[in-house]
Image (tube, rainbow, N blue to C red):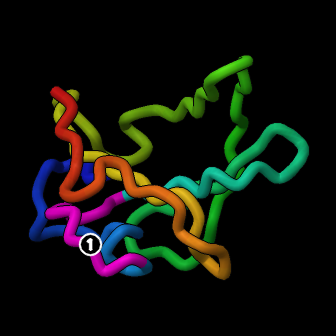
Amino acid sequence: FDFDDDPATGGPAATEEFAAVNAQMGVESYISLRDDGQGRVLRRDGLATNWRSMPVEFGPNSFTVRFARADVGETDGVFRVSAMIGGTGRWITDLVPSSGHYRVN
């Protein structure tokens, strides 16, 4: 997530770090979609090295992770997002979107 909508701030997107695909984002928060088996995923903010455990709700065809916008400095509802499926020792099977990012506003 690029919460300040500024590619010049934050860290590299996972798509850049692991797949060499420029997402045109400066990432303020990462969420690891790997479930821990107890209904939780991990979130890392900024350039921190520590990951925080977060609850996740799973539906039949979806999942929801909730956290306060204020926790990550998001103030105006406009942000950029991209995702990588796989990686970190596994084959990368998909990038979302295939290049660049989605801008939510």
Residue 59 at x, y percent in the picture: 71, 19
Location of the C terminus (image quadrant): top left
Instruction: Give neighbour class at mark 1: few <14, some 14-19, many 20+ (Cα, 10 Å).
Output: some
Q: Which residue is mark 1?
A: 21
Residue depicted at 17% across the width and 38% down the height: 103
96 to the left or right of 76:
right
Residue positioned 14% across, 49% down in the render:
5
1 relative to 85 in the view: left or right: left
User: Residue visible at 71% across and 26% down?
Assistant: 57
Q: Is residue 66 placed above or below 19 in the rendered structure?
A: above
Q: Is residue 2 above or below residue 14?
A: above
Report the front residue among 23 and 57.
Answer: 23
Residue 85 image point, x, y percent: 53, 57
Q: Main secondary structure of the magenta part?
A: loop
Which stretch appears magenta? 19-28
Q: Is residue 103 magenta?
A: no
Q: Residue at x 55, y 30 (%)?
A: 66
Residue 79 in which image quadrant: top left
SS category of the residue bearing label 1: loop
Q: Is residue 40 left or right of residue 81?
A: right
